[in-house]
Image: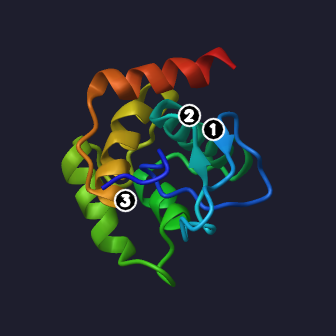
């Protein structure tokens, strides 16, 4: 189940994302961002991938997932294997921005169990590209 329009389970941090809203009282979800729509939740994921690529030089599934889902909190190797299986990407394959919609779709499946519609992913990607 996707809660808070946050299918990637993005945690609250220093950044205030476009489309991020305050949690509803009693939601018990204070550690994770809340978004006004799924598109904005996914857009934040695309923005994070851009930061990973530009600031940290993380451009392959293995490196991206190791930062996204660190071994201290996750079974990172299993996560990497599943994302590679879902996307067809190799773990060390260099990804470009055009590959991110497939990556985000697979990551959302891992994070929230949701099989998101490709049109939703593309809509969020266009929103990301627009700003």
Identity of the residue furthest to the bottom in this view: 72
Question: In terms of secondary structure, where does tag 3 sit?
Answer: helix
Q: Residues within 10 Å of mark 2 (few under 14, many from 20)?
A: many
Identity of the residue furthest to the right in this view: 14
**Which of the two marks, 1 or 3, is nearer to us in this view?**
3
> Image point 29% across, 49% down: which residue?
90
**Image spot of residue 117 (x, y percent):** 26, 30
Check whether the beta carbons of the residues at disc 1 and disc 3 lie within 8 A of each other: no
- In the depicted structure, whether residue 109 falls above or below residue 69: above
**Which of the two marks, 2 or 3, is nearer to us in this view?**
2
| Labels 2 and 1: the sequence-earlier one | 2
**Image spot of residue 101 (x, y percent):** 40, 32
Check whether the beta carbons of the residues at disc 2 and disc 1 lie within 8 A of each other: no
Quarter of the image with the C terminus is: top right
Question: In terms of secondary structure, where does tag 2 sit?
Answer: helix
Quarter of the image with the N terminus is: bottom left
On screen, residue 38 versus residue 110, left or right, reads: right
Identity of the residue furthest to the front in this view: 25
Question: In terms of secondary structure, where does tag 1 sit?
Answer: helix
Mark 1 lies on residue: 47
Q: How crowded is mark 3: few (under 14 residues within 10 Å), some or many (20 or more)?
A: some
> Image point 45% across, 52% down: which residue?
8
Mark 3 lies on residue: 111
Q: Distance between the residues labelled 2 and 1?
A: 10 Å
Q: Residues within 10 Å of mark 1 (few under 14, many from 20)?
A: some
| Labels 1 and 3: the sequence-earlier one | 1
Mark 2 lies on residue: 40
Q: Distance between the residues labelled 2 and 3?
A: 16 Å
Q: Distance between the residues labelled 1 and 3?
A: 17 Å
> Image point 35% across, 78% down: which residue?
75
Q: What is the quadrant of residue 118 in the picture?
A: top left
> Image point 45% across, 60% down: which residue?
65
């Amino acid at each position: 189940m996707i809660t808070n329009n946050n299918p990637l389970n993005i945690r609250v941090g220093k950044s205030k994302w476009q489309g991020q809203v305050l949690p509803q009282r009693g939601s018990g979800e204070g550690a994770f961002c809340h978004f006004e729509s799924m598109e904005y939740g996914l857009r934040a994921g695309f923005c994070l991938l851009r930061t990973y690529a530009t600031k940290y030089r993380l451009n392959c599934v293995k490196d991206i997932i190791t930062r996204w889902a660190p071994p201290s909190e996750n079974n990172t190797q299993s996560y990497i294997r599943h994302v590679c299986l879902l996307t067809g990407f190799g773990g060390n394959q260099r990804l470009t921005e055009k590959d991110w919609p497939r990556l985000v779709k697979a990551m959302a499946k891992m994070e929230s169990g949701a099989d998101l519609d490709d049109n939703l992913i593309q809509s969020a990607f266009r929103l990301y590209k627009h700003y």
